[in-house]
């Protein structure tokens, strides 16, 4: 059973930085797409950034220029470097991974809280 374990959330002041990590375990297969989504209180979950195993990235307009997504394919781990954080970045951040093998399936982490104080 694939599990995604996130780490790196916390409380930071506006303008600060955080680095989120998410490691997939329980499989010998490589994830295709991995990424981060976030959900603020009372709002829908939204995409933050995704990256394929080939390195192609998709970053939300709200994160462009401030957030960087990267991954270590050998470790099935994805990272999100968040700089110049704003109070509106406050949300629960969820890791996502898509594995085409052995069964085409999407997985989600349990979420990690990011709080940015003004």
Image (tube, helix red, strand yellow):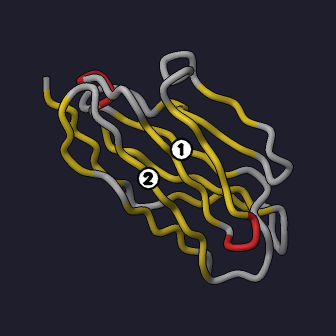
The local crowd at label 1, few if under 14, some if 14 to 19, many if 20 or more residues have their Cα within 10 Å, is: many
Q: Are marks 2 and 1 in contact (CB under 8 Å)?
A: yes
- Report the front residue among 38 and 59: 59
* Circle on res. 20: 2
The local crowd at label 2, few if under 14, some if 14 to 19, many if 20 or more residues have their Cα within 10 Å, is: many
**Helix, strand or loop at disc 2?**
strand
Figure quadrant of the N terminus: bottom right
- Report the front residue among 110 and 80: 80
* x, y percent for residue 101: 84, 70
Q: Residue furthest top?
A: 61
**63 above or below 74?**
above
Quick check: 69 left or right of 27? left
Mark earlier in primary sequence (2, 1) = 2
CA separation in Å, label 2 and label 1: 9 Å
**116 above or below 109?**
above
* Circle on res. 48: none
- Report the front residue among 37 and 81: 81
Label 2 or label 1, whichever lies nearer to me, is 2
**Helix, strand or loop at disc 1?**
strand
Q: Residue at x 28, y 26 (%)?
A: 15
Q: Which residue is mark 1?
A: 36
**72 above or below 65?**
below
Q: Residue at x 23, y 24 (%)?
A: 87
Q: Residue at x 71, y 56 (%)?
A: 98
């Amino acid at each position: 059973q694939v599990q995604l374990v996130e780490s790196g959330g916390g409380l930071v002041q506006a303008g600060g930085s955080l680095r989120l990590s998410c490691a997939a375990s329980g499989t010998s297969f490589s994830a295709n797409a991995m990424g981060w989504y976030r959900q603020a209180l009372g709002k829908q979950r939204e995409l933050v950034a995704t990256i394929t195993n080939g390195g192609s990235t998709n970053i939300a307009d709200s994160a462009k220029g401030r957030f960087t997504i990267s991954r270590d394919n050998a470790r099935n781990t994805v990272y999100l470097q968040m700089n110049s954080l704003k109070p509106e970045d406050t949300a629960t951040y969820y890791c996502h991974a898509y594995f085409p093998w052995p069964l085409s399936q999407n997985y989600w982490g349990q979420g990690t809280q990011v709080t940015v104080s003004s």
